[in-house]
Structures are given as C-alpha cells and as structure tokens.
Image (spheres, helix red, strand yellow):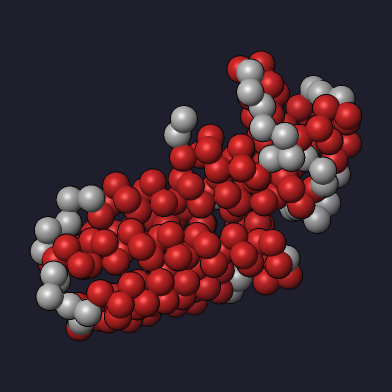
Amino acid sequence: MDATEDTTSQALRRAPSQKRSQERVERMLQAASALISEGGSDAMRMGEVAERAGVSIGSLYQYFPDKGAIIRTLAERYNAEGRACIAEGLADVRDMGGLVEAFGGLIDTYYGIFLAEPVMRDIWSGTQADKALRDIDVRDSRANGALLAEAWQRVMPGADVGAIERKAFLIMSLGESAMRLAISVERAEGDALVADYKAMALREIAAV
C-alpha cells in the first residue's frame, strides 16, 4: 500500500477492503475534485458528488459522513503526495550546498503545484476556518519538518538536533502560510512573496 492509499483509508468513515469498493471510493473523490475545480468546495453538494460518481447517495454516505470528510480526505491525499515529493527531493542530499539547492527547488515545485491545482488552492484557502483542516495542516508541517531536519542533520552532524528539528518545523509551517498568502494576491506580488520566503528559509538553513 502506498502513502496515498494509507492516508485515504485513515480519513474514511469505512475503509474499502475490496478492489471494487476502492474503485468506487476513487470515483467519489475524482467527482468531488471535479466539482471543487468547477465551482469551489462551498458550492459542492453530496448529491452532486454521488451523481457524478455514478453511485447512490447511500453508498457515498457509507464512506463519507459529510462534505467535510471528503475535503479532509482530499487534503490528506495532497499532503501524502507532497511528503513523497519532499522525501525524494532530499534523499540524495549530502552537503549544505546540495541541501540549499534541493530545498530551494522544492519550494519552486510546491508553489507551481499550488498555482496549477485549483482543488488544492480551494482546500487550503479554507484551512483557518476549519479546525480539522488546521490540525491536518499542523501534522503535515511537522511531518515535512522531520524530513527536512533529517537531511539537515545529515549535512551538519555536529549541530544542535533540537534546534534543527524546531527550525525545520517552523520553516515548513511558514512555507504553507506563504503559499496560501501568495495565491490570495495578484500573481506578481505572490511570486515576490514566495521568492522572499525562499530567501529567508535558505538563509536560515545555511546559518545553523
């Protein structure tokens, strides 16, 4: 089972055990993503998700008790994909120059994903208004921070482990906030904000 499948099963009311059920849940999530992309999560209705997925409303409720559960499942899925990308990007880091280059590239990649994926933008624009999404956000930042801290400690074995872990968590958390801010303003200002965040983060990493 890959990270996405594992995360999705944790967020469901009832985890699908058979391939047929897994395919049905996947259709539900794809339908929800399409509806969010077209009109936003606020306008999405459970009945529309069921209709577009080709399932009964009862079948949809077997797995998702409400619209929020669908959105949280999609959020967890995006987070799992992001963690896999970060882990891959930092896996071969062996020195500080490599860490700065790799992490800088990951910031650019993540910003590009935010710009290109309307569902992701919609989900995270509502994070502050939804406690469950805020909790997911914190857990994700902590997990991503652990990945950064591992690579950071690898290139600076003599540094304070606690300080690196704390700063890595903060850098990842601020990164999420920077991305949300960047996509809420005009593109030119958003690009500049991400560039400023990137410069601050890389400067902090190199300074430890």
Residue depicted at x 35% and y 53%: 86
Q: Is residue 51 left or right of residue 109?
A: right
Q: Quadrant of residue 32?
A: top right
User: Could you say where residue 104 lies in the image, as x and y percent from the top left?
Assistant: 28, 65
**Quadrant that contains the C terminus:** bottom left
Expressed as whole percent of the image width and height from the top left, the position of residue 179 reads 50, 68
Figure quadrant of residue 149: bottom left
- At horizontal 62% and vertical 65% (from top left) the residue drawn is 135
Residue 160 or 45: which is nearer the viewer?
A: 160
Left or right: residue 58 versus residue 186 is right
Corner quadrant of residue 181: bottom right
> Residue at horizontal 46%, vertical 45%?
81
Q: What is the number of callouts on the image? A: 0
Q: Is residue 104 above or below residue 83?
A: below
- Is residue 175 visible from the viewing direction of this image? no
Residue 152, position in %: x, y?
22, 67
Q: Is residue 130 above or below residue 57?
A: below
Along the line of sight, the residue nearer the viewer: 153 or 83: 153
Percent position (x, y) of residue 34?
69, 39
Is 108 situated left or right of 132 in this image?
left
In the rendered structure, the answer to whether residue 208 lies left or right of residue 23 reads left
Asked whether residue 181 is in view, the answer is yes
Residue under the point 53% across and 38% down: 6
